[in-house]
């Protein structure tokens, strides 16, 4: 069965926020910048956080500075991230959750090797679905 984690979206202060949460909650913090993921990134964008993960015992809190074109709005500052256990599960959940909503990021293979997609459900909540094939 899929596991669910909170995924927070920031507007340029993800590093600061996630470091603060680590100071409060403890655990190990991993930060991946745009510069880590892509060589052809302009200098001013290299330190933007693409993906952050704070793990403290059973707590997993994720975050990013990667906000959509419309900026931060009600409903997109926190995403519910489903880490699925099979390709069948991610496809089924993606289809079901997007009914009556909007499939914003189709399921696709990523540069990090996972199957990944995003959607906004009929209630305006954003979901991120991920299946790690390894």
Image: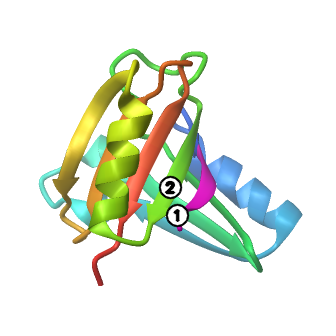
In the image: residue 93, left or right of residue 54:
left
Q: Magenta residues?
A: 1-7
Task: Please tell me which of labels 1 and 2 falls first in the chain.
Answer: 1
**In the image, residue 113 lies at what x, y percent?**
22, 71
Which mark is in front, 1 or 2? 1
| Secondary element type, mark 2 | strand
Residue 91 versus residue 65 in the image, above or below: below
**In the image, residue 15 lies at what x, y percent?**
59, 53
Name of the residue lying farthest toward the left? 40
**In the image, residue 25 lies at what x, y percent?**
84, 66
**In the image, residue 126 lies at what x, y percent?**
50, 32
Task: Determine the main secondary structure of the stretch shown in magenta.
Answer: strand
Q: Is residue 17 visible?
A: yes
Residue that carries the numbered disc 2 in the rendered image: 82
Residue 122 inside the magenta-drawn segment: no
Quadrant in which residue 44 is drawn: top left
Name of the residue lying farthest toward the bottom? 134
The Cα–Cα distance between marks 1 and 2, rounded to whole angstroms, is: 6 Å
Q: Nearer the viewer, residue 98 or 69?
A: 98
At 29% from the left and 52% from the top, the residue drawn is 91
Residue 2's label in the rendered image is 1
Q: Nearer the viewer, residue 12 or 53?
A: 53
- Where does the C terminus fall, quadrant-wise? bottom left
At 12% from the left and 53% from the top, the residue drawn is 40
| Secondary element type, mark 1 | loop
Residue 124's label in the rendered image is none
In the image: residue 22, left or right of residue 50:
right
Badge 2: residue crowd in 10 Å (few <14, some 14–19, many ≥20): many
Residue 133 versus residue 66 in the image, above or below: below
């Amino acid at each position: 069965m899929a596991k669910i984690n909170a995924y927070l979206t920031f507007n340029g202060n993800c590093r600061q926020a996630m470091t603060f949460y680590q100071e409060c909650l403890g655990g190990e913090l991993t930060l991946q910048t745009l510069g880590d993921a892509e060589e052809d990134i302009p200098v001013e964008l290299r330190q933007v956080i693409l993906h952050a993960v704070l793990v403290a015992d059973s707590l997993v809190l994720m975050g990013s500075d990667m906000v959509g074109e419309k900026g931060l709005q009600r409903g997109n500052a926190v995403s519910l991230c489903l880490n699925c256990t099979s390709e069948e599960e991610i496809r089924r959940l993606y289809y079901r959750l997007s009914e009556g909503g909007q499939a914003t990021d189709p399921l696709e293979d990523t540069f990090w090797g996972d199957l990944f997609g995003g959607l906004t459900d009929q209630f305006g909540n954003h979901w991120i679905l991920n299946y790690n094939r390894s």
